[in-house]
Image: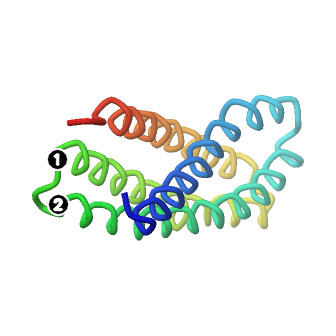
Amino acid sequence: MTKAIEVALFLHLLGVAVWIGGMVFANFCLRPALGDLTPQLRLPLLEGVFARFFNWVAASVLVILLTGGFLLTQYGGAHAAWPLHAMAGLGIVMMLIFGHIRFAVFPRIRRAVQAQNWPDGARAVGTVRRLVIINLVLGVVTVGTAVLSRGL
């Protein structure tokens, strides 16, 4: 394995860890801890958390996309083993879902907080939660594909 491949794999896995780890934290730690807060406190807090987290995810997505593309070319490109193509496909679906969250749903949260429209904000946060759960499942499947297909 060349140094370039090792560095790319490290950066790729670091991006994956930030993204999946953040989704686990947000869904299983932060969300339940905020359950007792009123919408007037919870929604502005979530807006601030999401604004920061989505910047980290965007950076991770860029790193994952660049390093994943590089790694795919190093392992055969179009002729690479099927698990690499499965990981790439799942990753692209995850990125599209993230794009929808970031550019379609998150602005609804921002507008609701600015207008103090707590019911609309709560609905948008619920949409984020459902999409994050889908992305979390896809992320776990992708990691499982990577680990269980080694040596194919």
Q: Position of residue 44 (x, y in %)?
A: 82, 56
Q: Nearer the viewer, residue 49 or 16?
A: 16
Tag 1 residue: 81
**Residue plotted at (52% across, 50% down):** 16
The correct choice, above or below, for 68 with respect to 133 in the image is below
Q: Nearer the viewer, residue 111 or 65?
A: 65
Mark 2, residue position? 76
State whether residue 144 is above or below residue 51. Answer: above
Name the residue located 76 percent from the left edge and 51 percent from the top edge.
Answer: 46
Q: Give the percent coordinates (x, y) of residue 91.
A: 37, 52
Residue 25: name its quadrant: top right
The foreground one among 29 and 59 is: 59
Give how far apart the Cα atoms at labels 2 and 1 are. 8 Å
Residue shown at 34% from the left, 52% from the top: 93
Q: Tag on residue 106?
A: none
Element under label 1?
Answer: loop
Using a 10 Å C-alpha cutoff, classify the residue at mark 1 as few (fewer than 14 neighbours), some (14 to 19) or many (20 or more). some
In the image: residue 117, left or right of residue 77: right
At 16% from the left and 54% from the top, the residue drawn is 80
In the rendered structure, the answer to whether residue 116 lies left or right of residue 123 reads right
**Quadrant of the image containing the C terminus:** top left
Q: Residues within 10 Å of mark 2 (few under 14, many from 20)?
A: few
The mark nearer the N terminus, 2 or 1, is 2
In the picture, the quarter occupied by the N terminus is bottom left
User: With 58 as the anchor, is 1 left or right in this view?
Assistant: left
Image coordinates for residue 71, horizontal then vertical, percent: 33, 62
Query: What's the amino acid at mark 2?
Result: Gly
Is disc 2 placed on a helix, strand or loop? loop
Q: Are marks 2 and 1 in contact (CB under 8 Å)?
A: yes
The amino acid marked with disc number 1 is Ala
